[in-house]
């Protein structure tokens, strides 16, 4: 399928395998070919973190958004969460991933955290945290 | 006849209630009726046409894409523009939650003579209980139908034995009454359209369509909702203007308080009419509180791509749930500062008028995208009306501040 | 590299003169394809606006009004931008690294040829 980054990918809704909305495509990770090789760059991953959106918005507001979101990041990671494109099952009318939300602990960390600590603490959180 | 189909117009009615007979409108319509008669009824007409066009469009987009209207904003306009739209939307709906919550309290004050501030926390608890225990569909049906008690205003117009020719003449005179300035007239026109053609009606309607899981098979339901709900809302708004006109205008009385909204009904229909009106106002403000509260949660959730909604259990939409509860608490806190809900509504309506185009644009763009919509893409009618309303919203957006200043907020 | 770094990037010829700006990127993706997509997603080409590109033109491209798939009453606003837009196949980009992309202007075709 031929997609337009502006119209089909960037800032579009991403859901998990059960069609539960979890995040937006805040940027795309691409691999750049060698100069002069004539190869096409590959889109390797979806960047799903408001941190990346903050960088795109720019200015003071964007910087605040980016740093607030970065605080929620898993300490082991050096940037916002990236989901490989082979985990994308569908693109139109919105992106659907092959995994269910509990199996994606690095994405939408605020949601994971709130579920665990605020909204449903007695349920022991998601599978992935056990 | 299938009872489900019979009640299936309630989403439209509930969306319309929040737009046409919420607390802002209740006071604005009474005020405008007392001051200009029906000379601003044409504005309500335009608001009805405009919101019908965009609610249908966003409902159709929701049926095809399973995504509601505000969700489209970021995808089509980018994170920066959509952020401006989000901030505007949050300010409007956030402030309105406080105003509508106060409206519930004021309705209770009308019924019991206990000061409204004491009712505010009670109202908040009631709202919380409804949100927690009532499923979306039931909530929608209950308030959609109870809101119909506002038809008592139409009955009141009848009972006041008006000179119908006189009313018609007032409605067809597109000019301020003698002694009133044009700037104040147009300021109130903008206030009315800002209060009645609010984007959150469209957001709520399309989010409701997604909650109902409407698909292209439900296009008829979408259209019935739009064609029944919003014109009904417009009719009720005009009825309020008319009762206010018939009772206050001849006596030169100005409307400043919500209790005056119900007075004409009491005069026309006595205690029974007043009781029904109070029930209606309670239902309308309760429905509007739910609508604006949800809209605030939806706005934030849809910008960031979170799960949301009444249909999802709180555990599956934690960010949305936390947002809703926080907004309600903030609304109570704001109300308890004793700031007038009417003042808050005027600010909210002004903001809404200023960001109006940013809300309509993404819907018009997506509804015209053949790759997304397939055979449900916009036809000529949707596009003609849609672009006219969009152009109008741009005019409104740039003129609201100058009119506010020039007319000294309607005082001139 | 991120796609956000590609959008808005200048394209220069071998002589170093800037002749276009990237306003959209077309991607070939083998989805839907059941459980997980069957292959890599490749960048097929770039949509370019002639340099210097105004914010208005970039915005028109962003909203999709310059592409054939978005019809409707706002299209006339984008007629000029669409006529001037170019499409460059990814294979024809000589250099991706560096501050600007390097490609020969003659390699680019009118967008209208590619997007009907």
Image: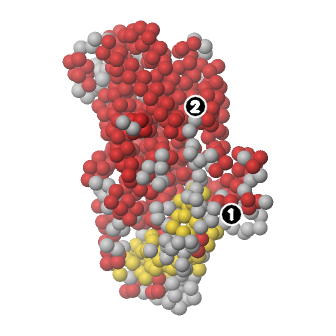
From the top left corner, tell me how far across and down residue B211 is, in percent: 50, 46
Q: Quadrant of the C terminus of chain B?
A: top left
Image height check: is B398 above or below A34?
Answer: above
**How many marks are shown on the rendered structure?**
2
Query: Does dot 2 land on a helix, a strand or a loop?
Result: helix
Residue furthest toward the bottom?
Answer: A37
Q: In the depicted view, which residue is nearer to us: C71 or A120?
A: A120
Q: Which mark is residue A103?
A: 1
Subunit of label 2:
B
Query: Front-most of A58 and B10?
Result: B10
Q: Position of residue B83 (x, y in %)?
A: 53, 52
At horizontal 74% and vertical 53% (from top left) the residue drawn is A125
The chain under label 1 reads: A
Furthest toward the right, the residue is A130
A19 over B172 or under it: above or below: below
Quarter of the image for residue C87 reads bottom left
The residues tagged by marks 1 and 2 sit, at their Cα atoms, a distance apart of: 39 Å
Q: Percent position (x, y) of residue C28?
A: 47, 77
Q: Is residue B184 visible?
A: no
Residue shown at 56%/69% (left/top)? A88
Marks 1 & 2 on one chain: no
For residue B103, say whether it is visible.
yes
The residue under the point 37% across, 10% down is B268
Q: Which residue is mark 2?
A: B98
Image height of A86 relative to B95, above or below: below
Closer mark to the observer between disc 1 and disc 2? 1
Q: Position of residue B393 (x, y in %)?
A: 37, 44
Residue closer to the observer: B333 or A84: A84
Q: Is residue B177 left or right of residue B261?
A: left
Judged left or right of residue B27, residue A43 is right
Eyeballing the image, is B275 above or below C99? above
């Amino acid at each position: 399928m031929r997609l337009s980054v502006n119209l089909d990918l960037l800032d579009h809704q991403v859901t998990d395998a059960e069609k539960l909305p979890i995040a937006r495509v805040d940027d795309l990770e691409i691999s750049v070919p060698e100069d002069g090789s004539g190869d096409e760059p590959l889109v390797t991953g979806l960047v799903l973190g408001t941190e990346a959106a903050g960088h795109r918005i720019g200015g003071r507001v964007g910087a605040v958004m980016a740093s607030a979101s970065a605080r929620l990041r898993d300490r082991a990671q050096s940037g916002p969460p990236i989901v490989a494109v082979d985990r994308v099952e569908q693109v139109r009318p919105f992106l659907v991933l092959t995994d269910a939300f509990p199996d994606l602990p690095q994405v939408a960390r605020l949601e994971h955290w709130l579920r665990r600590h605020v909204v449903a603490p007695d349920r022991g959180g998601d599978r992935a945290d056990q | 006849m299938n009872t489900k189909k019979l009640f299936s117009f309630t989403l439209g009615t509930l969306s319309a209630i929040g737009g046409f007979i919420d607390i802002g409108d209740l006071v604005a319509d009474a005020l405008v009726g007392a001051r200009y008669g029906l000379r601003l009824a044409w504005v309500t007409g335009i608001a009805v046409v405009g919101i019908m066009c965009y609610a249908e469009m966003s409902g159709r987009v929701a049926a095809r894409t399973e995504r509601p209207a505000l969700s489209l904003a970021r995808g089509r306009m980018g994170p920066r523009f959509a952020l401006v739209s989000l901030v505007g939307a949050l300010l409007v709906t956030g402030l309105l939650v406080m105003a509508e919550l106060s409206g519930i309290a004021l309705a209770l004050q009308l019924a019991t003579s206990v000061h409204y501030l004491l009712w505010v926390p009670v109202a908040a608890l009631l709202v919380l209980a409804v949100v927690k225990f009532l499923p979306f569909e039931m909530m929608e049906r209950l308030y959609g139908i109870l809101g119909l008690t506002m038809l008592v205003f139409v009955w009141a117009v009848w009972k006041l034995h008006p000179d119908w020719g006189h009313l018609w003449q007032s409605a067809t005179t597109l000019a301020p009454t003698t002694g009133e300035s044009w700037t104040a007239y147009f300021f109130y026109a903008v206030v009315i359209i800002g209060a009645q053609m609010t984007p959150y009606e469209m957001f709520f309607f399309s989010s409701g369509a997604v909650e109902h899981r409407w698909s292209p098979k439900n296009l008829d339901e979408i259209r019935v909702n739009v064609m029944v709900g919003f014109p009904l809302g417009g009719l009720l708004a005009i009825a309020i203007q008319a009762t206010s006109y018939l009772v206050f205008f001849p006596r030169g009385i100005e409307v400043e308080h919500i209790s005056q909204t119900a007075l004409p009904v009491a005069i026309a229909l006595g205690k029974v009419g007043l009781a029904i009106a109070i029930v209606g106002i309670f239902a309308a403000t309760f429905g509007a509180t739910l609508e604006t509260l949800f809209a605030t949660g939806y706005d934030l959730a849809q910008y960031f791509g979170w799960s949301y909604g009444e249909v999802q259990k709180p555990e599956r939409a934690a960010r949305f749930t936390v947002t809703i509860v926080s907004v309600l608490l903030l609304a109570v806190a704001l109300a308890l500062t004793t700031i007038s809900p009417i003042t808050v509504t005027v600010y909210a309506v002004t903001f809404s008028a200023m960001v109006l185009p940013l809300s309509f644009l993404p819907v018009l763009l997506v509804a015209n995208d053949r790759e997304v919509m397939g055979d449900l893409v916009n036809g000529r009618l949707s596009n003609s009306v849609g672009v006219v309303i969009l152009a109008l919203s741009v005019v409104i957006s740039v003129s609201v501040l100058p009119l506010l200043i020039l007319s000294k907020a309607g005082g001139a | 590299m991120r796609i956000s770094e590609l959008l808005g990037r200048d394209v220069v010829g071998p002589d170093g003169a800037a002749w276009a700006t990237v306003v959209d990127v077309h991607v070939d993706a083998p989805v839907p394809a059941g459980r997980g997509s069957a292959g890599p997603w490749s960048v097929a080409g770039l949509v370019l606006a002639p340099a210097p590109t105004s914010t208005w033109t970039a915005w028109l491209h962003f909203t999709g009004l310059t592409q054939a798939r978005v019809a409707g009453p706002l299209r006339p606003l984008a007629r000029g931008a669409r006529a001037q837009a170019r499409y460059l196949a990814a294979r024809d980009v000589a250099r991706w690294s560096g501050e600007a992309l390097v490609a020969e202007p003659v390699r680019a075709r009118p967008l209208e040829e590619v997007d009907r």
